[in-house]
């Protein structure tokens, strides 16, 4: 992904946006801050046939 500029997380509304892009269908993420640097890792799961698996609600 590109440079991390903004992260919006609203748990009650189910909103997860990164740089204005909706990522609410990812299966996981990790946001860290170390020595003045934010890092974001996003995880998506796929089945053996290549179909993206949606997180369970």
Image (cartoon, rainbow, N blue to C red):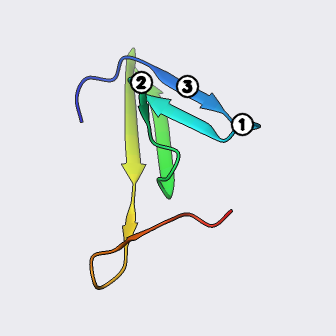
Residue linked to disc 3: 8
| Left or right of 27 in this view: 36 | left
Residue 18: image location, x then y, percent: 42, 29
Quadrant hosting residue 22: top left
Residue 40: image location, x then y, percent: 39, 36
Residue 13 numbered mark, or none:
1
Secondary structure under tag 1 reads loop
Residue 13: image location, x then y, percent: 72, 36
* Foreground tag (3 vs 1): 1
Identify the residue at horizontal 48%, vertical 35% (top origin).
Answer: 31
Q: Residues within 10 Å of mark 2 (few under 14, many from 20)?
A: few
Give the mark nearer the N terminus: 2 vs 3.
3
Residue linked to disc 2: 20
Give the Cα distance between marks 2 and 1.
16 Å
Q: Relative to the observer, which residue lies in front, 29 or 25?
A: 25
Identify the residue at horizontal 28%, vertical 84% (top origin).
Answer: 49
| Left or right of 54 in this view: 49 | left
Tell me if residue 8 comes above or below residue 11 in the rendering: above
Secondary structure under tag 2 reads loop
Give the Cα distance between marks 2 and 3.
8 Å
Q: Which quadrant: the C terminus? A: bottom right
Q: Are the residues tagged 2 and 3 within 8 Å (C-beta)? A: no
* Foreground tag (2 vs 3): 2
Quadrant hosting residue 43: bottom left
Give the mark nearer the N terminus: 3 vs 1.
3
């Amino acid at each position: 992904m590109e440079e991390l500029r903004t992260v919006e997380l609203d748990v009650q509304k189910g909103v997860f946006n990164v740089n204005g892009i909706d990522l609410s269908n990812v299966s996981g993420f990790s946001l860290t801050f170390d020595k003045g640097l934010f890092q974001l890792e996003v995880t998506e799961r796929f089945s053996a046939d290549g179909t993206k698996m949606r997180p369970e609600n």
